Amino acid sequence: MTPKLNSKNYIIRAFKYSDLQTFADYRARPEVAQFQSWSSYVLEDAISLFENIDYKNFAVAGNWYQLAITDIQTDNILGDLAVYFIDDQQVEIGFTIAPEFQKQGIAFEAINCLLTYLFTELKIHRIIAITDANNTASYKLLEKIRFRKEAHFIQNVFFKGVWGDEFQYALLSTEFK
Ligand SMILES: CC(C)(COP(=O)(O)OP(=O)(O)OC[C@H]1O[C@@H](n2cnc3c(N)ncnc32)[C@H](O)[C@@H]1OP(=O)(O)O)[C@@H](O)C(=O)NCCC(=O)NCCS
């Protein structure tokens, strides 16, 4: 079963139907879509994504799980985390915070909470994150969490009409403080 994690100010949990309109609305914002695979995003996209997540069987290798970051007082969704189980001991993460809640430390706190769970409860060995090389907010966030830059891929993705670069970051359980 998908865990429900508590940080100081937020809850990280499986999505509910009631989150999906807000989720679709912030995914549709140009500043959120800029470095992501979609250009537009509507409620039907969110429902389809949600209904394809196997929340009952968490941590299955080869599966993505989308987790909501919600306010601990109101349970309103503020952003989300994506977790992909590469194999039994390696995970890739992704993250988005709704524009009106950015730059308040939410991603930093929520990701640290998720990393603590993955490393200590699930005994994950290595966690990676891949970001567009122009996504300053994303790679600065990863560096603040102490992810290590492992790679700069040159023009490895044909993305929204142009070839783009990506950075890969990683963190081992032994490196996590
Ligand atoms: C990347 C993102 C998740 C950051 O979320 P956030 O909650 O605003 O981040 P935090 O407030 O926790 O910031 C933590 C650190 O990240 C870095 N950071 C965050 N936003 C930044 C920005 N706009 N410019 C530069 N650095 C930034 C800073 O180092 C910051 O630490 P500081 O406040 O001590 O300077 C958010 O900008 C976002 O959702 N962007 C759109 C979606 C996206 O591109 N996701 C990544 C896909 S790989």
Image (cartoon, rainbow, N blue to C red):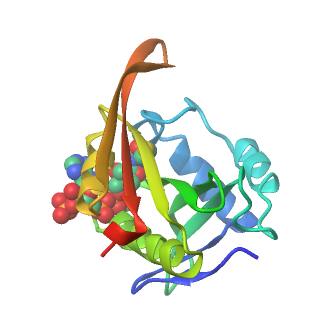
Q: In the rendered image, which quarter contains the N terminus?
A: bottom right
Residue under the image location 59 percent in, 32 percent down:
40
User: Would you place residue 82 above or below residue 27 in this image?
Assistant: below
Name the residue nearer the viewer: 77 or 145. Answer: 145
Task: Residue 109 in the image: state x and y as whole percent.
Answer: 36, 73
User: Would you place residue 176 above or below residue 137 in this image?
Assistant: below
Residue under the image location 55 percent in, 29 percent down:
39
Relative side of 44 to 77, left or right? right
Name the residue nearer the viewer: 80 or 57. Answer: 57
| Residue 100 in view here | no
Relative side of 139 to 40, left or right? left
Relative side of 125 to 109, left or right? right
Relative side of 52 to 149, left or right? right
Ligand 1 - quadrant of the structure image = bottom left
Residue under the image location 40 percent in, 62 percent down:
172
- Give residue 2's quadrant in the image: bottom right
| Residue 147 in view here | yes
